[in-house]
């Protein structure tokens, strides 16, 4: 029996759904730990713009963690990859114009005034959590880390809380889907 390219492509296409399900599993060994497929939840897939980057303070008040007008972009892909960037809009420019010749204050402002990371994510619809498996981050201590955050999604608005910092602040990120 002679098999043509159409038959081969059809056979490959029939395997794609099975590989997609297998790809959603974190571990197929004895632990049987799996993640929820992104498509099993209200979809986070898309491009989001930052609407708030605040700290919930121990006294219940909120403060802007990245200034009055923070800027940010978040992209969730259907294949489970993500990229996130948050910046203070009022970060100081380097007086030298050369990022290799900044002052200690300029370096501090550049570091503290941004939060960026990328990697893979999964969603647990029952627990309303997003788990970020961070490949790389602007804060190098997060490289390779896994972080889980409770979230709320209402239409095209998304908000999550980061675990409390040592001083008791709870960082909150709020986003609006733009695409």
Image (cartoon, grey):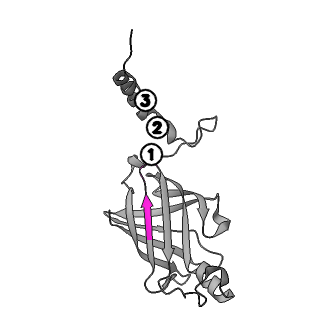
Q: Position of residue 11 (x, y in %)?
A: 40, 24
Report the residue marked by disc 1.
37
75 in magenta: yes
Q: Is residue 178 left or right of residue 100?
A: left
Q: Which residues are magenta?
A: 73-79
Q: N-terminal of the two: label 1 or label 3?
A: 3
Report the residue marked by disc 3.
15
Q: For the residues marked 2 and 3, what is the alpha-carbon distance in whole angstroms? A: 10 Å
Placement of the N terminus among the 4 image quadrants: top left
Compared to 123, does 59 lie above or below?
below
Q: Position of residue 178 (x, y in %)?
A: 32, 66
Q: Position of residue 4 (x, y in %)?
A: 36, 19
Viewer-proximal residue, 65 or 12?
12
Q: For the residues marked 1 and 3, what is the alpha-carbon distance in whole angstroms? A: 17 Å
Q: Closer to us: mark 2 or mark 3?
A: 3
Placement of the C terminus among the 4 image quadrants: bottom left
Task: Please tell me whether mark 3 sits on a helix, a strand or a loop.
Answer: helix
Report the residue marked by disc 2.
21
For label 3, count other residues whose C-alpha is less than 10 Å away and answer few (under 14), some (14-19) or many (20+).
few
Q: For the residues marked 2 and 1, what is the alpha-carbon distance in whole angstroms? A: 8 Å
Residue drawn 45% across and 48% down?
A: 79
Compared to 114, does 123 lie above or below?
above
Residue drawn 41% across and 34% down?
A: 17
Viewer-proximal residue, 20 or 122?
20
Asked whether disc 2 touches disc 1, contact meaning CB atoms under 8 Å apart, the reply is yes
């Amino acid at each position: 029996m002679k098999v043509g390219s159409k038959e081969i492509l059809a056979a490959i296409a029939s395997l794609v759904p099975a590989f997609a399900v297998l790809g959603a599993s974190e571990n197929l060994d004895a632990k049987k730990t799996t993640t929820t497929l992104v498509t099993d939840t209200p979809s986070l897939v898309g491009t989001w713009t930052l609407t708030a980057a605040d700290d919930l303070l121990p006294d219940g008040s909120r403060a802007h963690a990245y200034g009055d007008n923070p800027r940010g972009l978040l992209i969730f892909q259907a294949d489970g990859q993500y990229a996130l960037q948050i910046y203070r809009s009022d970060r100081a420019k380097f007086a030298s114009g050369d990022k290799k010749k900044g002052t200690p204050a300029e370096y501090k402002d550049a570091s503290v005034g941004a939060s960026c990371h990328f990697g893979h994510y999964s969603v647990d619809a029952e627990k309303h959590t997003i788990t970020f498996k961070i490949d790389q981050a602007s804060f190098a201590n997060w490289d390779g880390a896994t972080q889980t955050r409770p979230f709320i999604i209402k239409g095209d608005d998304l908000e999550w809380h980061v675990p409390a910092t040592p001083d008791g602040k709870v960082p909150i990120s709020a986003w609006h889907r733009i695409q």
